[in-house]
Amino acid sequence: MTRTSRAPLPLWLAVVVAVAAGPVLDAGFPDKDWWPLTFVGIGMVLLALRGRRAGSAFLIGWLAGESFYLVHVAWTALYLGPIPWVALATLEALFWGVGGILITLAYRWVPRAWPGLWGRAGLLPVIVAGLWVLREYVTGNWPYGGFSWGRVAESQSESPFAPLAAWLGISGLSFVMVWLVALLVELAFAIDLRAVSRGVLAIGAVALVLVIPAWPTPTHGTTRIAAVQGNGPAGYFDDAPEGAVLDSQVAETLKIAHEKADIVVWPEGVAQPDPTRDPSSAAILDALSRSMDATFVVGTITYRDGKYFNTSLQWEAGKGAVDYYDKKHPIPFGEYVPDRAFWRPFAPDLIDLIGRDYTPGTRDNVFDIDGVRAGISICFDIVDDQLLTDMMKGGAQVILAQTNNADFGQTDENQQQLAIARLRAIESGRALVNISTVGSSQIIAPDGRTISEIPPFTPGHMIADVPLGTTTTPATLLSRGIEFLVAGLGLFGLLIAAGARRNPAPDGRRPLPPMR
């Protein structure tokens, strides 16, 4: 293995590589969807961090995170301008900076603690990958519930690596991706190994990951589901009269009123005014439900006990809302303002745009619809690992993902969200109905295939016999234990390496041994 601990890149070049890594990473995600570039971007970040001191490692990590998120979540600036966009990107980038310090410490300490081939090519990539996932875990949970958008695994929804989500979940897939890149980088520096040996190890590692078979996705029976994309004026800043979004949903639903369906799904927030309080809305849903002889699952905004909720209703003709689910994780600074008194002075005009604060729900996220167990996901719920775990524990056989992408226009956001939904279908072994106000709307099979879809930004509908999942995938069986395990491996390995260091840093000025 290499005998030098010096950084392979001078700091100025490492900075350039880190800044360039962000757009390269983003290109692996939809809508470009050049998924191999995600691996290239990971490699660029690791190469730039290798051999750095803590201060420069923070700089490298911060720059890589900043350049990535400024591109990846540029859709946040579409209507709100640059302040929330830059603020979100910078917050996430700070976590990247701290993660960069941990990874560069691993590059420094692990080879000293375990200087042989096993330590450098065996343990080091595992620890580096675990620390990467640890950073993804922290950003996905803190502050204010976190922001799980942009995990590297979310770029692989249509790649050959996607089936691994059923085995390892999204965090486990991120771990494997970073482990593979870290190993290849380490082999590239293993100059005291023959080139043939390094090539065999590299090819073997890639093959080991790709030969893992897709998890079988047995199903038992089907349910006929219709999903309606009204393409109404559902944006926060749309100047539309009350009921306009409901009217667009009704108009498109009437086109399939003669069709047979067991469940009709509408997107997030379209059944307004709230049919549990507005007789006119209730009468419309009753008439449609009776006409189609189907249960409707519709999104609305409810007001109960002095609190607002982003709600999904299970509506049956003549009975009304027989069950409901309130979104458990409203979006901070989107659906509510945490610590409003503290944040308002920084941007009062923006903060005041959020006139009402939605309250987190406490109810379970599974509906029993005539014996079919349907897991309910509202918008950014789809990125929350715990909510998927909850619906699987609740016996969900199919997932209904309701969302409103109107505020993001024709940006990458809707495609990024659809990619996450596709991974969730694979991860859970469940068919998933992703229905948006404006798109992208698809019915996705348990293996990730597209069963049906509606073109974005046009009124439309999907009707399909959707298979009901029966399998328990390893990812859902082990649930977040996988995430805790791999993140723990990284942190625990780093701490053990810190205590086990027994050799001074190798002198990079010593001559290298002849290649064998």
Image (cartoon, helix red, strand yellow):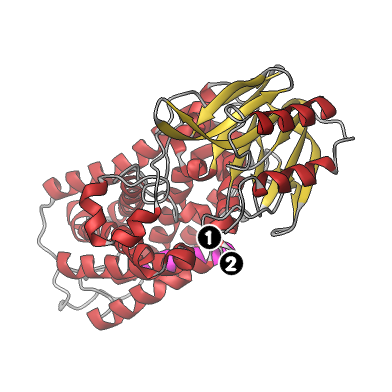
**Residue 67 shows which numbered tag?**
none
Residue type (three-letter) at the residue carrying disc 1: Ile
Question: Can you say whether 115 is above or below 145 in the image?
Answer: below
Give the SS element for disc 2.
loop
Label number found at residue 203: 1
Of circles 2 and 1, the one toward us is 2
Location of residue 457 by image quarter:
bottom right
Residue segment shown in magenta: 30-46
In this picture, residue 463 sits left or right of residue 236: right
- Give left or right: position of 154 versus 433: left
Any magenta on residue 33?
Answer: yes
In the image, residue 55 sits, relative to residue 472, either above or below, namely below
Q: Residue at x 85, y 44 (%)?
A: 255
Label 2 to label 1, Cα distance in Å?
21 Å
Along the line of sight, the residue nearer the viewer: 54 or 105: 54
Q: Who is closer to the viewer here, 128 or 302?
A: 302
